């Protein structure tokens, strides 16, 4: 795993782009005033699926927390969305679940690029229509590794990272100081806990990141209780990222 830089500092330069894992989208007031709520699909110009979204109602009840949810290897946007769909309404979470261009996320197969640009397009569309004041990124398995990699790279955009059973973190550059929630099953046979989270968590903490770590009895999965704990852990409005 690459060295994780000290949080709160920018490591890189103005030439950073999607090849470094940097997203260009930023929080701003919506240009349009979308009214659609519930589940929906975001399509590519050619008709392929870019992402699934879920918008709790009502739209005019104040800004949302947007949560990007990343599926595991060989998974789908539907599986990403389902990670936190049960708590979306009660916590007013606007969910965005991208579909990877390949069988898994770009940084794992060929390096940052394609999936970063796809996510930028999706987020630009969603943020252009809905009020959002806070953003998180999360995922399961390969999606958790990608969430950590993107979240540490874009900690000036995401205030928190939810990593369910990750394997690694591979940021090329780091920005901001996002809080981190990591969970892992003690009998995980896909991404064994001793080689993954039990090594990753101390490195993140040594690098200065605020990490909440939950081990549970089980395998390569995301138990309902872990989802509830992760949801309750999300920073409240007004909390300083990394504080």
Image: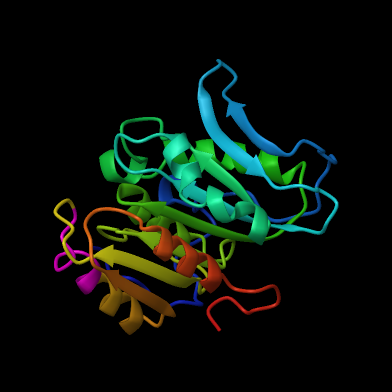
Q: Residue at x 39, y 43 (%)?
A: 71
Residue 165 relative to residue 126: left or right? left
Q: Is residue 211 above or below residue 192?
A: below
Q: Nearer the viewer, residue 20 or 216?
A: 216
Front residue of this view, candidates 211 and 183: 183
Residue 196 belongs to the span the image colors magenta: yes
Q: How many marks?
A: 0
Question: Which color scheme does this rendered protein use?
Answer: rainbow
Q: Residue at x 16, y 62 (%)?
A: 187
Residue at image position (30%, 59%) is: 165
Q: Residue at x 59, y 73 (%)?
A: 235
Q: Main secondary structure of the magenta part?
A: loop
- Where is residue 58? Give x, y as percent: 80, 48
- Image quadrant where one finds the N terminus: bottom left
Q: Quadrant of the C terminus?
A: bottom right
Q: Quadrant of residue 72?
A: top left
Q: Quadrant of residue 99?
A: top left
Compared with residue 155, is residue 242 higher up or lower down, i.e. above or below? Answer: below
Looking at the image, is 219 positioned above or below residue 242? above
The x and y percentages for residue 164 are: 36, 59
Q: Nearer the viewer, residue 138 or 207?
A: 138
Horizontal placement of 104 versus 56: left or right?
Answer: left
Residue 170 lies in magenta, yes or no?
no
Range drawn in magenta: 191-199
């Amino acid at each position: 795993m690459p060295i994780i830089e000290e949080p709160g500092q920018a490591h890189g330069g103005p030439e950073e782009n999607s090849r470094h894992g940097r997203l260009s989208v930023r929080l701003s007031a919506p240009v349009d005033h979308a009214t659609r709520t519930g589940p929906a699909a975001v399509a590519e110009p050619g008709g392929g699926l870019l992402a699934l979204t879920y918008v709790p109602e009502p739209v005019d009840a104040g800004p949302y927390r947007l949560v990007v949810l990343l599926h595991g290897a060989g998974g789908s946007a539907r599986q990403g969305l389902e990670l936190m769909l049960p708590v979306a309404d009660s916590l007013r979470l606007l969910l965005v679940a991208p579909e990877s261009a390949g069988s898994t996320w770009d940084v794992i197969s060929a390096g940052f690029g394609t999936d970063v640009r796809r996510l930028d397009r999706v987020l630009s569309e969603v943020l252009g229509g809905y009020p959002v004041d806070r953003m998180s990124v999360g995922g399961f398995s390969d999606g958790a590794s990608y969430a950590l990699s993107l979240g540490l790279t874009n900690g000036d955009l995401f205030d928190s990272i939810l990593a369910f059973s990750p394997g690694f973190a591979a940021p090329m550059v780091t920005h901001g100081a996002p809080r981190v929630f990591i969970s892992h099953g003690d009998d995980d046979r896909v991404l064994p806990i001793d080689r993954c989270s039990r090594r990753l968590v101390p490195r993140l903490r040594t690098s200065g990141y605020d990490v909440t770590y939950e081990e549970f009895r089980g395998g390569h999965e995301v138990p309902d209780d872990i989802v509830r704990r992760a949801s309750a852990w999300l920073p409240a409005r007004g909390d300083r990222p990394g504080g």
